[in-house]
Image: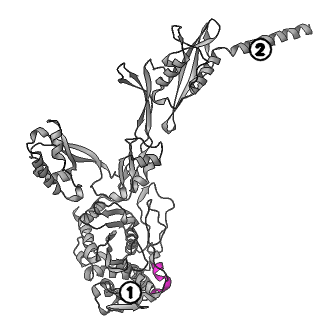
Amino acid sequence: MRRKATVATTLLLAVTALTSCSSDDGPDATVAAFIDGWHSGDLTDIGFITPAGERVPATDVTEELTALSGDLKDTPPTLRPDGDAEVTEDIATATIAVEWTLPGDVRWSYPTSVRLRRGADDAWQIIWEPAIVHERLGSGDQLALNRLAPPRGAILDGAGQPIVAPRAVVVVGVQPSEVDDPAALADQLDAAFRAIRPAISPPVDVSGLADRLDEAKPDAFVEVVTLREEAYEQIRDRIYELPGTMFRRQEWDLAPTREFARALLGTVDPVQRQDMEAHPGRYEVGDLVGHGGLQGGYEERLRGVPGYSVQIVGTAPDGSVSGDEVVFRADAQPGEPVRTTLDTAVQTAADAALADEEQRAALVAVRVSDGALVAVANGPDGGTENLALTAQVPPGSTFKMVSALGLLEAGAVDPDAPVDCPKTATVDGRSFTNSDGFELGRVPFRTAFAESCNTTFVELAPQLEADGLAEAGRLLGLEGEWRLGVSAFTGAVSTGGPPAERAAAAFGQGTTLVSPVAMAGATAAVARGQWRQPTLIVDPAPPSAVPDGPQLDPAAVQALRTMMREVVTDGTGQALRDVPGEPVHGKTGTAEYDDDPANTHAWFIGWQGDLAFAVFVEQGGSGSGQAVPIAERFLRGLTTG
């Protein structure tokens, strides 16, 4: 019995082994070979037939697979069997899991069915049909990939409102059939466009308009220019009745004004070749890309993530493409906003104050109570470089605010102490003079400060000792490691050096360099009584907030405030005496550069109520002559805007 059992067991194992071997030639093996061939592009070892049983060459299947894949043909899908084939007599059905990898690592997965038929030689052949690639595909169809552009994130102001928003514009055009004299019309339009205030519209070129009208169809709308509504209203009466003129009202996404914080915000433009070369695969033709400023610096956050859809399209005999059945869609992820501290009204007033400047200029405004930067303006025309934050220039006599604080805190002088203000002062053989060579004789320190007497500070410089000026500057935030979320120059204060260098540094010359934002922050510190780092980007918040500085000596800072008020009431800033609102405090500055007294930058720093500010004009001459009028326009603009 034991021997018979052993023989029976041996026979059973043999039968099992034979069954396993025969399964290698079953439908699952053919499906596995098809999967490998689909992915590799080599299907020569597989038999294909039509649903009617006619043989199909493997090369034809390969070509049709490529055609059906359409836009996805260069990235074959990942394929795997999804369970065993179901066999009913000579017909089998297998399921394949298909996964395409789309751009941006987007995955599209779905199951597809493959039918097989057993031939006379017991070999399994695949019944070829387009539905194998996707159940909705038919002969002549193909998969089309569409990129879905994400909505760009907004840059927000301090109130959380988008700075760029839909605003009214007017498209000015001409209908050729209504124009008898195109050249005359061009001249009339040119004269009208030149009358628009430059701050709200760029120059309009109509030099080729006459030729365009001659070449256009008689009933065409020949576009001339798109104007902001306020620009159009300036010249509406001059152009509305001109022969052939036509007008279309639209809404465009625009900043509040044309020059609104342009250098800070940057621009959003069609993608350029250098963008695509710098970031292969990120952009496609037609994309919008941030360049410069916040738009460029926060491009990754603002641009969002593109989405993709796959649709089935068919090709007609004449080659035309039709059909739009979407079989897959991964929605775009909108860009995230960037929130700033800008105040729209204050920024608009700052831009307007610089609008008529021909020299490069900047105006920075800081809210004293919390350090928020509420205006970062550059000119002319909004500026191409953000001098407001990144300029590295001598501060001139605005730095007397820093020197005076150092002298007052050291007890070296008080506002009423008599000091000398000679026409010239000499240190180590170097001669220093006052602007236009004025002299005051012996006057109270506050008077020398209000009249911006250089020679007084030259003679007091030794009282600051080697590092006294730099220490006073650091009390006001200069040379600090600020975290604004954008690049900013916080200053480099002269320290040590020979007596002549220390004398020059005492009134803002020598090797000391600052930026408008650095001086605005220092001015806010005097108004507040303590330095606090200015803020600009709220979300995403810069890491590791910089701690506030120490409290300034109450007596010293109060004396300095009094002297800065006297600059306006009796000194070099008297043009600001009658500005509406709270009293204005400030300090003018005329900063030499290139070691040439004829080459000077113009400055004014000051505050009114809760608003501190700094005005800088490159090669602007004197602070009182050029910077103070800008400050006046700015402050008056705040009350009338």
Question: Which quarter of the figure has residue 603?
Answer: bottom left
Marks 1 & 2, CB-CB < 8 Å contact: no
- Residue 506 against residue 288 in the figure, above or below: below
Dot 1 lies on which element?
A: helix
Vertical placement of 577 versus 176: above or below?
Answer: below
State the image coordinates of residue 344 (x, y, percent, origin top left): 30, 58
- Horizontally, residue 89 falls left or right of residue 358, namely right
Q: Which of 526 and 57 is in front in this view?
A: 57
Image quadrant assignment for residue 508: bottom left
Q: Position of residue 636 (x, y in %)?
A: 23, 67
Mark in the foreground, 1 or 2: 2
Residue 465 part of the magenta-drawn span: yes
Q: Distance between the residues labelled 1 and 2?
A: 106 Å
Residue 556 - label: none
Q: Which residue in the structure is indicated by mark 2?
A: 17
Residue 84 located left or right of residue 624: right
Q: Where is residue 200 in the image (x, y as percent from the top left)?
A: 23, 56
**In the structure shown, which secondary structural element does the residue marked by tag 2 occupy?**
helix
Name the outermost residue toward the top: 120
Q: Which residue is drawn at 54% across and 19% down?
A: 59
* Residue under pointer 1: 457
Q: Give the range drawn in magenta.
A: 463-472
Q: Is residue 551 visible?
A: no
